[in-house]
Image (cartoon, helix red, strand yellow):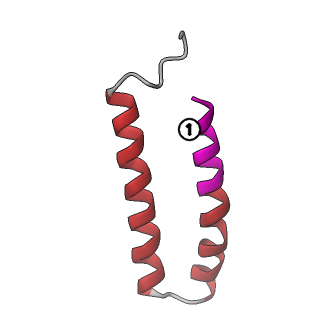
Amino acid sequence: LVILFLLFDVEAVLLFPCLMNMIKSLDLSLLVNMMLFLMILMVGLLYEWKNNMLDWSK
């Protein structure tokens, strides 16, 4: 569970500069890369949820 929190903290740190660059210029490749990165994280989160790895009572 701790690794999951670390993963999403790193995700926030990596996405913040991308968001700042998107404000300055609307770059389609940056948007596609951000969406791909978020989709990979969401697939990982759904996998952990489906396998009951997010159970806090363990």
The crowd level at tag 1 (other Cα within 10 Å; few <14, some 14-19, many 20+) is: some
Residue 49 percent across, percent down from the top left: 38, 30
What is the three-letter code of the residue carrying label 1?
A: Leu
Q: Where is residue 29 in the image (x, y as percent from the top left)?
A: 42, 84
In which quarter of the view is residue 44 placed?
top left
The quarter holding residue 21 reads bottom right
- The tally of labels here is 1
Asked if residue 35 lies in the magenta stretch, the reply is: no
Left-right relation of 46 to 12: left
The span shown in magenta is: 1-11
* Among the 4 quarters of the image, the one containing residue 24: bottom right
Question: Which residue is drawn at the image coordinates 39% and 56% (left, top)?
Answer: 40
| Horizontal relation, residue 38 to residue 24: left or right | left
Q: In this rendering, is residue 26 above or below 11?
A: below
Mark 1 = which residue? 4
Q: Which residue is drawn at 40% across and 48% down?
A: 42
- Give the answer, above or below, for where 30 lies relative to 44: below
